[in-house]
């Protein structure tokens, strides 16, 4: 049970880092310059569900592979939330088209990067606690 707490908490930290990366890229208009309309306001309403979902995704670290190579594991596991965001969330919940193409052609690249941030920060947090 202790491992689950660690993985959930690490996932929450990863989600916080991911959210700050998304917000900073929008705040400094990095996404806008690249033609992607992702620039959220930093608010508790936007942040809270992202952190909870990040914690839930963090539970994937319980999977018994690559435990000695956590950074690589985090990078690989980050592909799962990327796929869900691009193929489920954007088209069906946000109504932004497959892979969020209505937000800009480079949307999948940014989503992949932001979720990679989640995976790496989550892996680092797990490594520090262990």
Image (tube, rainbow, N blue to C red):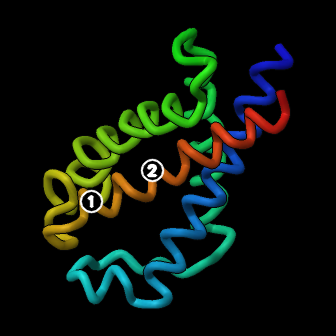
**Quadrant in the rendering for residue 46:** bottom right
**Quadrant in the rendering for residue 31:** bottom left
Q: Position of residue 122 (x, y in %)?
A: 64, 42
Q: Position of residue 107 (x, y in %)?
A: 24, 64
Q: Position of residue 78 (x, y in %)?
A: 44, 39
Q: Quadrant of the C terminus?
A: top right
Label 1 neighbour load within 10 Å: few <14, some 14-19, many 20+: few
**Quadrant in the rendering for residue 102:** bottom left
Q: How many marks?
A: 2
In the picture, measured across the screen, residue 83 lies left or right of residue 67, that is left
In the picture, measured across the screen, residue 77 lies left or right of residue 106, that is right
| Residue 105, placed above or below residue 118 | below
In the picture, measured across the screen, residue 62 lies left or right of residue 8, that is left
Q: Earlier in the sequence, mark 1 or mark 2?
A: 1
Q: Position of residue 9 (x, y in %)?
A: 76, 39
| Residue 26, placed above or below residue 45 | below
| Residue 72, placed above or below residue 67 | below
Q: Which residue is mark 1?
A: 109
Label 2 neighbour load within 10 Å: few <14, some 14-19, many 20+: many
Residue 115 image label: 2
């Amino acid at each position: 049970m202790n491992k689950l707490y660690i993985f959930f908490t690490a996932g929450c930290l990863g989600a916080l880092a991911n959210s700050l990366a998304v917000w900073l890229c929008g705040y400094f208009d990095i996404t806008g310059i690249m033609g992607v309309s992702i620039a959220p306001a930093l608010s508790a309403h936007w942040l809270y569900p992202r952190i909870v979902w990040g914690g839930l995704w963090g539970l994937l670290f319980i999977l018994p592979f690559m435990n000695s190579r956590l950074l690589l594991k985090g990078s690989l596991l980050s592909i799962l939330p990327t796929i869900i965001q691009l193929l489920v969330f954007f088209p069906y919940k946000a109504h932004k088209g497959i892979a969020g193409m209505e937000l800009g052609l480079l949307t999948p690249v940014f989503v992949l990067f932001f979720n990679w941030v989640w995976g790496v920060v989550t892996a680092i947090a797990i490594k520090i606690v262990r």
